Amino acid sequence: AYLSAVEGLVTERAGLIQRLADLRQPESLAKKVAQQQEEAARLRGQEAELRAKLKNARAEAQRDKANLELLKTFFLDCLVRSRLPGFHQDDSVDISPTNFLPQVSGKNDGSYTSFSNLGSGGKKCFFKACFAVALHRLAAHTKGLWPTVLVIDSPMKNTSERENADQFAGFYEMLYELKETELRSTQFIIMDKEFFSPR
């Protein structure tokens, strides 16, 4: 009888301990929720501060358009010197500061050329290569942090160097001239199906 009574008390004690733990659980959960809310409020404050800094930095970058104007000049110069058909010295280049994608507009016809409306033909390869060269020229001019290696992969991939000999020669002559002048510190790695030797 004694052992049975003790066993009953032990079982009752275990039940009370479990009830106490169950009662404490919402209190612990409430504390965790409060801590998470405090952390969320702190992070919201940090986010607002960072957004304000980013907004100011964007506004400052858009006010300082000198480098962007220089990039436009270098890009158009590369296109013209490469003797790519359809590009002229009096064309205008627009580069949005939000996405940095170039768009070249003709002076009178109202048409424009960009990455999005060029087909997969040879002109697109040259257009991209000229933009990369222009970025390297800008970095060299401003002494900005920029890789000193320029890799151009298959610029003549979709273009016949025999049918478009002038364009082929113009592009390589432009690269060789820049290597001797503005980009003398840049290493060029060019992979192509035809070799155009420097003169």
Image (spheres, rainbow, N blue to C red):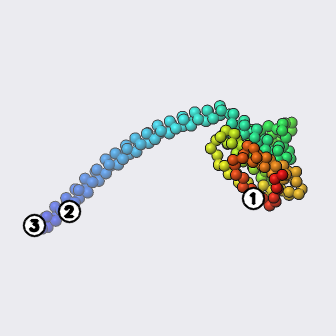
For the residue pair 86 and 1, the one nearer the viewer reads as 86
User: Which type of secondary structure does the marked residue at label 3 adopt?
Assistant: helix
Residue 123 visible somewhere in the drawing: no
Q: Is the residue under label 2 in contact with that under label 1 (CB below 8 Å)?
A: no
Left or right side of 170 for 55: left
Q: Nearer the viewer, residue 97 or 27?
A: 97
Q: Secondary structure at mark 2?
A: helix
* Circle 2: residue type: Thr
Q: Residues within 10 Å of mark 1 (few under 14, many from 20)?
A: some
Residue corresponding to mark 2? 11
Outermost residue, right direction?
163
Q: Position of residue 175 (x, y in %)?
A: 78, 49
At label 1, which amino acid type do we have?
Met
User: Residue at left 73%, top 43%?
Assistant: 182
The N terminus lies in quadrant: bottom left
- Which residue reaches farthest top? 63
The image position of residue 134, as x and y in percent, is 73, 44
Label 1 element class: strand
